[in-house]
Amino acid sequence: MNLILLGPPGAGKGTQSVLLERHFGIPQISTGDMLRTAVKAATPMGTQAKGFMDAGNLVPDHVVVGIVRERLQETDCLAGFILDGFPRTVAQADALSESLSQLSRALDAVISLQVDTDALVERLTGRRTCKDCGKGYHLKFDPPAVNGSCSVCSGELVQRDDDHEETIRRRMDTYHQQTAPLEQYYSQSGLLVKIDGMDAIDDVHRSILAYLQAS
Ligand code: AP5
Ligand code: MG
Ligand code: ZN
């Protein structure tokens, strides 16, 4: 199963990827998570990426294309993969298609999560992430058992650096200008499936599985 999860900031790409990873036993490949790891480790790539991310802009295509190309060659991707937050531009989508054909692989579906803008803002402002294991929460929709502390590892829950109002607005604009055209791109190749992302987390998961099982 080779999947892409597409959708604006806060649509639930990360949340649904983790559930699909568990269901199918194939890895989630989140370029956002990989970039945040590089920022935290202060690698040269992370240092370069940080400015773009803090501003709510995209990191240059060649940087993310290189990361994903390498990641897809790892053995755990042989049974499939879930791309979360990649591709985000037509150039990235073209590069992905080239990488996959070199590996004799093909995409099975591009799942586009449909969520209203008001709901996106509420999801992003209420999101918290475990500082130690990276597990995601939402203060209202997916709260931890103990306030401020991760239910898995007891790590501290923190807000992402780019989850502040001004950056959220910029990320939304970036999505509409540079990433939304990918719906049309993948619709032309018959891979696009729109899933209602406004339902509760488990219901969205069930909708995705129902589509994949029927297709
Ligand atoms: P990235 O980390 O990918 O951020 P994003 O696209 O803005 O998306 P988010 O991670 O914010 O949202 P999500 O859809 O994963 O939602 P989540 O599941 O967490 O990218 C960050 C930055 O890195 C970019 O701005 C860019 O600079 C750079 N970057 C990354 N990839 C790049 C690329 N390919 N090219 C160039 N630059 C790149 O859910 C959000 C919240 O809502 C959570 O709290 C969750 O619990 C809650 N929630 C989820 N689903 C539901 C539901 N159904 N009902 C209620 N609450 C829900
Ligand atoms: Mg995410
Ligand atoms: Zn944790």
Image (tube, helix red, strand yellow):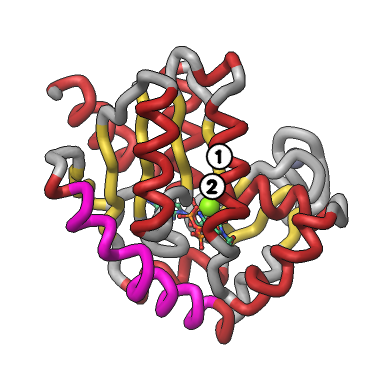
Neighbourhood count class around disc 2 (C-alpha, 10 Å): few under 14, some 14–19, many 20 upward: many
Q: Quadrant of the C terminus?
A: top left
Q: Please identify the quarter of the rendering in which residue 125 is found.
A: bottom right
Instruction: Identify the residue at horizontal 35%, vertical 51% (top origin).
Output: 6
Q: Which mark is residue 68?
A: 1
- Residue at (56, 43) in percent of width and height: 30
Image quarter where ligand 3 lies: top right
- Whether tag 1 and tag 2 are in contact, CB under 8 A, the answer is yes
Q: In the picture, residue 57 is in which quadrant?
A: bottom right
> Label 2 amino acid?
Val
Residue 38 in magenta stretch: no
Instruction: Count the labels in the image.
Output: 2
Q: Secondary structure at mark 1?
A: helix
In percent of width and height, residue 181 lies at: 26, 64
Q: Secondary structure at mark 2?
A: helix
Tell me which amino acid carries mark 1. Val
- Which stretch is magenta? 168-186
Q: Nearer the viewer, residue 146 or 197?
A: 197
Image vertical order of residue 196 relative to residue 24, above or below:
below
